[in-house]
Amino acid sequence: MNDAGHPSSGLSRAVRRLVRVRIWLADHLRVTELQATLIWAAIIGFLGAWSSIGFKEGTEWLHHLFTGFPQGEQEGYVESFQSLAPWQRVVVPTLGGLLAGLTLLFGNRFKAQANSTDYMEAVVVGEGNLSTKISLVKSVSAWFSSASGASIGREGPLVQLSSLVASVLGKRLKFPLARKRQLVACGAAAGIASAYNAPIAGAFFVAEIVLGSVAMEAFGPLVISSVIATLATRAHYGAEAIYAAPVFTLHGNAELLPYLVLGLVCGFATPLFLALMKAGERAFSLVKLPIWARLAIGGLIVGLLAVIHPEVVGNGRKLVFDVLHNDLLHNPLTWQMLAVILGCKLVATAATFGSGAVGGVFTPTLFTGAAFGYLFGVLACRLLPDWGMQPGAFGLIGMGAFLAAATGAPIMAIIMIFELTLNYQILMPVMLASMVAYYVCRSLNPNSLYGEALKRKGAAAVAQHLSTLKVGDLMIQDSSTLSPNATFGDVARHFLQSRHEFLHIVHDGIFLGVISLHDIKPYLDQPELESLLIARDVMREDFPTLQPGQTMNEALDTFGRGESERLPVTDADRRLLGAVSKTDVLLFLAGKPKRSK
Amino acid sequence: MSSPVLPPNAPLILDLEAATEHEAIRAVCGLLNGNPDVKDVVRFTEAVFERQKINPPLLGSGIAMPHARTPLVKEVVFAVARCVHPVPFGDSATPVRLIFLYGIPPHRVAEHLARTAALARKLNNPAVIKGLLEATDAVAFFELLS
């Protein structure tokens, strides 16, 4: 083809090729929304892991400060408390509780306005914005609690911190709402993954518990974030399984039967565990004490128990390890000893959790399951001595079954046990026991450990949004108004063009009342009414109105008393300012942007 | 004397002599004097005039349906008149022979619509109008509306 006369004839062949390549690259290498989310998920996984490492290291340092126990002895809280005098065992958790409580008291000054205070709330009902101040206050409080031996898991603050990193990034870079929420979820997955060295379980934790879905669109970024977080954590701490257990061997298919029974028993026992945690909360709410006093009392209870059984302190990780290895503080484990420690640990966890300490009950749940499974295993081994089973194996299976039932996330529990132990043989019995425990527990108690908290937080977030949001914030201009002197024909025509069920009647800017479509609908086929009736004749004056300064809570009460999906907003002189619709309130609560005015 | 479209005991005058709209309406309102459901006939009449000023309700075929939604009536009240000579109503001086006047309490929106629609439907029939104009007494008049 001759280049002469062609529009691009001024360009050489090489330049035209380059332009074509550039266009092809631009078309094929354009970063899509999903690709951008995946890239950010990786960045958040990395940053989330380092926030977790920072928290863990900070906690070890503070624990050293509290107890004088050498730093670097990972999770050696039980040993460090053993080395303390009895009075110190009481003072350290009490002081830690007091400091944690004072931190929360100080933090109460920061009232979250548009931002959420919890990652679950931010992902599920919020706008993906976590309050930085409140998140830091909660983390500092958890830092004091964890470092002083409170019987509570660290996964709470770890997840909160890594979610906060994601939220801050999302806010700074002005990400769209959906991506902000997704990335906060990625932060949470990174937190769990780095806390337990469990990348798959980290992703499933958020997918099953927080998002309630394992759809690829949401799950992919969670996996990326978890994997990167785990790699970063392993680079710092090493790649060992957290609960490296003795080799688990399944001797035959019949052995699955006792594990199935264990699943059943765990299914019945988990609601009791959940009830105990709630009882702890109720007991502390009965004594009307300030937050600092409650947390100090929670610490005191743990301290008093630690005088006799220092095993109760900390998140219980060491205890899980001891149960699985049939070795309690370098002494052979007896079932009587374990039963007593389990009882004390449950009281300590209920006291810490009930006092309002910030943290998680994930690791305490693992220990409860492990101890419960071990005790069941002792009984099973006595009844079936020829089967060659080990109580420690039941501890492992019990851990998975209890976790599945308590969290309401059986897939996560199965994968978590596999990742914690890195033992493939364990998968089948864990799957069986976990699913059985899950279904039995759900049939007895539909609320899981996180489900109830999420429900409460969701309800609280909605209530907070409704109490801070003003009618004026959601008010839009009212385009469906009519003069009181408009003919019946005008009214009918207006309804034809409007999607509303009520027309607002306004004279000289003053709101007079409404015409209900329901009232006039039966007469729309009577053209003779056009010359007989005007809007004023068929207008309802007793229609509720809103003022711009009213809260959305009050507005919803008004909506609830009437049948309208839209209410007029007036000033004190009944001058019409605009209208608010229920749809806009719902869209706001769902985190969707307000419709254009 | 009762009919489904008009309440029982609606007062009727078959030979109203009036020269103007005002005179005719005042005379029909006067039929409600002593009705316990009308709190103040004079003020009620003013309310009807107010409504007339906005848009006089004329059905056509020489029929006017003046009305007022007002707290001055406790119940729906009707008064009916047949004019001896056509009376000019409204700016267009529409000649009116039959006047169906009514008052409705403010909260009875649905009833207002139902009554107006029922009466308009009935009066849409030329045979009924002819009968009303020729009726010799109240019984015959109301029977046509039943």
Image (tube, coloured by chain):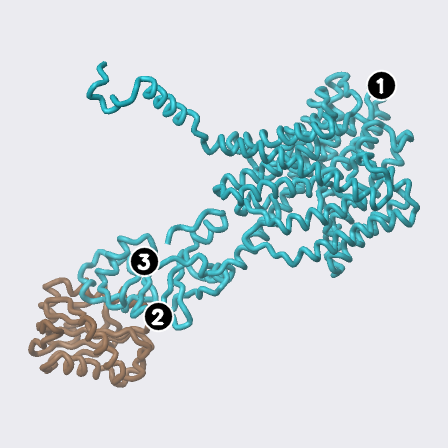
Chain colours: A cyan, B brown
Answer whether labels 2 and 3 touch (C-beta < 8 Å).
Answer: no
Q: Is there any visible trace of residue A385 in the rendered image?
A: yes
Specify whether disc 2 shares its chain with disc 1: no
Whichever of labels 1 and 3 marks the residue nearer the N terminus, that label is 1
Q: Nearer the viewer, residue B59 or A430?
A: A430
Question: Vertical placement of A343 versus A39: above or below?
Answer: below
Answer whether labels 2 and 1 touch (C-beta < 8 Å).
Answer: no
Determine the secondary structure under disc 3.
loop
The residue that appears at 25% across and 67% down in the rendered structure is: B115
How far is mark 2 from mark 3, CA to CA? 26 Å
Q: Amino acid at mark 2?
A: His
Q: Which mark is residue B107?
A: 2
Q: Amino acid at mark 3?
A: Ser
- Describe residue B56's horizontal placement relative to residue A281 as left or right: left
Please state which of the two labelled residues, at mark 2 or mark 3, is closer to the viewer. Answer: 3
Q: Which mark is residue A479?
A: 3
**Which residue position is annotated with label 1?**
A386
